[in-house]
Amino acid sequence: MTTSRISAVAIALSIAFGFVGGAGSTQGSAKDQTLSGTIASCKRMADGKEWTTANLNVITSSSYCYDDAEPNCRRYGRLYTWESAQRGCQSLGDGWRLPTDDEWRQIAKHYGGVGNDSRDKGKAAYTALLSGGTSRFNAVLGGNRSIDGQYDRLEAHDHGMSVSGHVAWPLAEVAAGIDGQEHLGPSGWLTERIVYDDVVQLYKAAGMWVVSTLVTASTIEIYKPWLEAMRTSTLKMYRAGILIAAGTDRPSLPGALHEELKQLVESGLTPLEAIRAATFDAARVLRAENEIGSLEEGKIADVLILDANPAENIDNTRRIATIIQAGRTVKIVPPETGADARDR
């Protein structure tokens, strides 16, 4: 045990004064102790220091629940002013205190770092330290309150998640901070048949991605008149540097995905560019490119081995010889048997 112990509280500073929210969730520990009717658990982390891994949940003056709703204390942790958080930490026993900014940075370094210490703007560390992450630190986000006492809204981006728009007005998507668009077709009849140049530049400037779902127009009769326009728009966006990922909007997998790859090639992408759209670029959309999407050391071993070259003919993606899922070879069962693939 180190000489100083740290109570893990996520700091959310406003302009005028600081608010502090409990970070983490209860995970059993040998150090569990009951304090003021709450359970505090702690863990020695990779930085060698002992941190709480349960929300600070000591009721002190100037502590509160997000949106003044008691259920939010259980969901996000109790929130505190800086002074009340200090008092809450002291009530845990000798040595417990709030972490410094440098201590947060040092623990994050063990999981990819943040700021200048990071290659991915802190995404890996953020994911590892959040609840359910590989660090078992189990931080949760607390929310914030403005100087006039109004609560900020908790959004998907606050939780490290990306957001897609379902064929909405382009300017509205960008203004809302949407990360990408699903479909380039006529859902809701809100889109032009071919995407305008200014929309392409708008999406590019906003860093948005697009999932065209061409297979919908190629297989559903009512949408077939839109297919050529969707292909043209897909190629137009791809050539402008917008990330195109493969998706289907169809429940018939994996067949629908093979058809989507074919439609991407029909749009003007090369077979290897289409395959990348379904692998590495799709992983980028999911913010999971550090775990899946390409064959690299340390990534999850999901591998499809074919008996024909897909670079010569995209239909060869259907000629599957071997499937390796998470490092295990999966038995391939002919579809006409109606049986499912089973592990060997």
Image (spheres, helix red, strand yellow):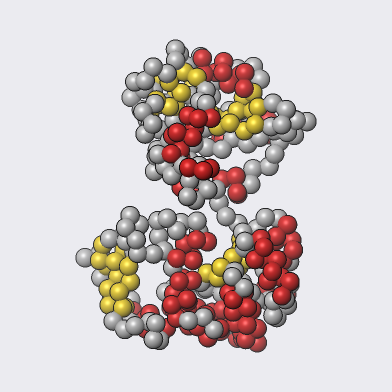
Image quadrant occupied by the C terminus: bottom left
Image check: 13 left or right of 340?
right
Residue 116 is situated, as x and y percent measured from the top left of the image, at 51, 43
Q: Residue at x 68, y 71 (%)?
A: 200
Q: Residue furthest left?
A: 344
Residue 244 is situated, as x and y percent measured from the top left of the image, at 55, 70
Q: Residue at x 58, y 74 (%)?
A: 238
Residue 171 is situated, as x and y percent measured from the top left of the image, at 74, 63
Is residue 266 in view?
A: yes
Image check: 332 left or right of 253?
left
Image check: 326 left or right of 210?
left
Q: Residue furthest top?
A: 94
Up-down relation of residue 291 to residue 7 (above or below): below
Image quadrant occupied by the N terminus: top left
Residue 76 is situated, as x and y percent measured from the top left of the image, at 56, 35
Q: Residue at x 64, y 43 (%)?
A: 154
Q: Quadrant of residue 216?
A: bottom right
Up-down relation of residue 293 to residue 125 (above or below): below
Front residue of this view, candidates 245 and 156: 245
Front residue of this view, candidates 120 and 279: 120
Q: Residue furthest right?
A: 148
Front residue of this view, candidates 90 and 298: 298
Q: Quadrant of residue 225?
A: bottom right
